Amino acid sequence: MRPGRGPAAAPGAAPRASGAQAWRWAGPALAAIALAWGGWHLQPSWQKGEPIARGPVGAALFAKGADAPLQLLGPRALPQAGAASAQAAPPPGATAPASPAAGQGAARPAAPLQAASPEAAAAACQRFLKRLPTIDAATCAAARLADGGAASVRGTPLYGRDVGPPPASRAAGGGAEPLRVLVVGAMHGDELTSASLALRWVGLAEAQVRDAGSNLPVHWRFLPILNPDGLLARQPTRVNARGVDLNRNFPTPNWESDAPIYWEKRTRRDPRRWPGPEPLSEPESRFLYTQMEQFAPDLVVSIHAPYGVLDYDGPVPPPSRLGRLRLDQLGIFPGSLGHYGSVRQGMPVVTIELQHELRMPEDGQVRQMWRDLLRWMGTHLARDGAPRPTP
């Protein structure tokens, strides 16, 4: 879902020499210029016969030679990849799994992620606190992160937390069944603010669930740090420990041809965008896939940085803004979560692009984005009292 940019430096890390890597910042720089030039006015455009709200960032990304979305690719736009391309060699420094079968080694079925004990929660937080902007020990511990039953490439547990009633617990008296909302942070390990925002929202979700006056019942599931190996690397990295961009590793239509072609032709084999040897080759992407299959969310919120816009894929009208982030639909990419969720699963995927990887929005904006999200959910996703099957 997200095109390229340079890696974020770890807090307190020594600055890296720009030199040969300066080109990696060209995308965000051009996007910032486009924003300054075009303002926030959304330009309507057409994509497969459907109107898309595309602003300056989206327009810049569709420019010739840019890291263009999937609509500019495919068999009619680029040469067909042969067998070698379909199993593209990893970039230098990346490693492929010994037996990268998508159906092997999948995480166990998604059990309820109940609040962990205070001791377990504190232990989980100790792994990540040094990399979480504006999150102190008390705030992290209050999130009560639980082991999700799966681990990263390097064996770090993948943590999560449920807030609200489980899916099997329906409102008494034939009331509305709770919406199921999955919030994902730090899919890219160098986007540190995305993990912090997800953790900050756990407390807001608890308050929303406790609010007796709320007419929007929600079962929240938070996965704040999907890529712990990237986040905990000496210098945080976009990719996981095997060099795979998790946001290009989901089983979208024609992945076997589109993903390698996209990586080779559009990104010029950028090692930060390697989609992996096949869909769901990574334990982290398999974990999220399992969560989506078993939890069956009505909405996925994926948090990223640093474009400072709101992206959206899905079957219902998009939110026009969350806080200061305004809608600017960027298109879909081979293997991206937005593409997989919207096209394969028919569910809305809201992608939040924070303005900075290291600098969190002020508290007022954190809360305003939350309020705007709830308002949009209440308008476009809230159900009546009719129950639906439990997955």
Image: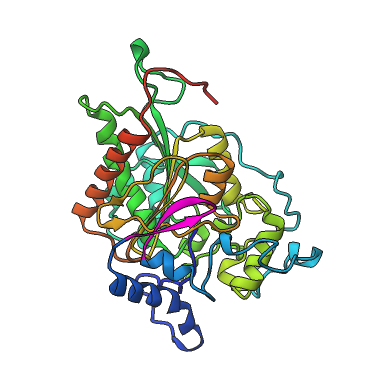
Outermost residue toward the right in this view:
83
Q: For this rendering, which residue is in front, 172 or 265?
A: 265
What's the residue at 60%, 71% (across, down)?
A: 266
Q: Specify the principal SS of the magenta part.
A: strand
Count of numbered circles on the image? 0
Q: Residue at the bottom extreme?
A: 19
The answer to whether residue 72 is left or right of residue 165 is: right
Residue 337 on the magenta segment: no
Q: What residue sits 55% from the left and 69% below the top? A: 272
| The stretch drawn in magenta includes residue 48 | yes
Q: Which residue is drawn at 41% across and 62% down?
A: 191
Q: In the rendered image, which quarter contains the C terminus?
A: top right
Residue 268 visible in rendering: yes
Residue 274 at what x, y percent from top left?
A: 62, 66
Q: Which of 341 and 204 is in front in this view?
A: 341
List x then y, in percent, for residue 93: 64, 73
Q: In which quarter of the image is residue 54?
A: bottom left
Location of residue 366 with respect to 133 vertically, above or below: above
| Residue 363 left/right relative to 171 | left
Q: Position of residue 222 (x, y in %)?
A: 41, 42
Colour setting: rainbow
Q: Residue at x 53, y 67 (%)?
A: 68
Q: What stretch is highlighted in magenta?
A: 42-55
As drawn, 340 above or below 154: above
Q: Examine the image and state in which quarter residue 316 appears.
A: top left
- Above or below, comparing residue 229 to residue 226 in the picture: below
Quadrant hosting residue 298 = top left
Q: Can residue 240 be seen in this view?
A: no
**Residue 90 x/y as whole percent:** 68, 69
